[in-house]
Image (cartoon, rainbow, N blue to C red):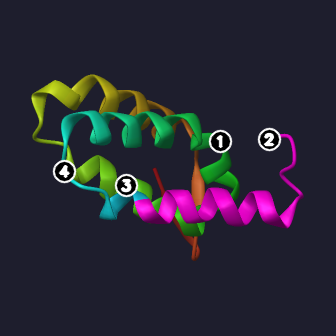
Amino acid sequence: MYEDEGNATTVQIISSVIESLPALPAHPKISRTALLLCGAYSEWLRNHPDKLFPAVKVLLANVNDVGLHKYGGIFANYTVELETQYNGELIV
């Protein structure tokens, strides 16, 4: 659990950041940072499965960029390790 996890402001800020990632410009450095951020917050995403879809959008948007495979892989590995249940369906 992240420090300040129970703090509503912290949850709101992280939620806003994750939700805004798919709207960022398509640039390798921005995409790399977005993928790394998603990987870093994979545990947080496990506890907030309603925010998983924007993160997955970032992963899928960059799946064809060979230069970003390493960073997408980091996020994908963390995501697969987390069994996230959302709406009664298992998402891995």
Q: How far apart are marks 1 and 3 (CA)?
A: 14 Å
Q: How crowded is mark 3: few (under 14 residues within 10 Å), some or many (20 or more)?
A: some
Residue at figure coordinates x 88%, y 59% from the top left: 7
Lower sequence index among marks 1 and 4 = 4
**Disc 1: which residue:** 43
Q: Helix or strand or loop: what does disc 2 sit on?
A: loop
**Mark with earlier residue (2, 3):** 2
Between the residue at mark 2 and the residue at mark 4, the CA separation in whole angstroms equals 29 Å
Mark seen at residue 26: 4
Q: Are marks 3 and 4 in contact (CB under 8 Å)?
A: no
Of marks 2 and 3, the one in the foreground: 2
Which quadrant of the structure image shows residue 42?
top right
N-terminal label among 3 and 4 = 4
Looking at the picture, how far across and down is residue 17, in whole percent?
A: 54, 58
How far apart in space, not on screen, are marks 1 and 2 (Cα)?
Answer: 9 Å
Q: Which of marks 1 and 3 is nearer the N terminus?
A: 1
Circles 1, 2 touching at the beta carbon (< 8 Å): yes
Bounds of the magenta span? 3-20
Residue depicted at 58% across the width and 48% down the height: 83
Is 47 above or below relative to 27?
below
Q: Which residue position holds label 3?
A: 56
Identified by mark 1, the residue type is: Glu
Q: Quadrant of residue 25?
A: bottom left
Looking at the image, is 1 positioned above or below residue 18?
Answer: above
User: What amino acid is at disc 4?
Assistant: Ala
Of pointers 2 and 4, the one earlier in the residue sequence: 2
Q: Position of residue 74 (x, y in %)?
A: 40, 27
The residue lying at 59 percent from left, 42 percent from top is 41
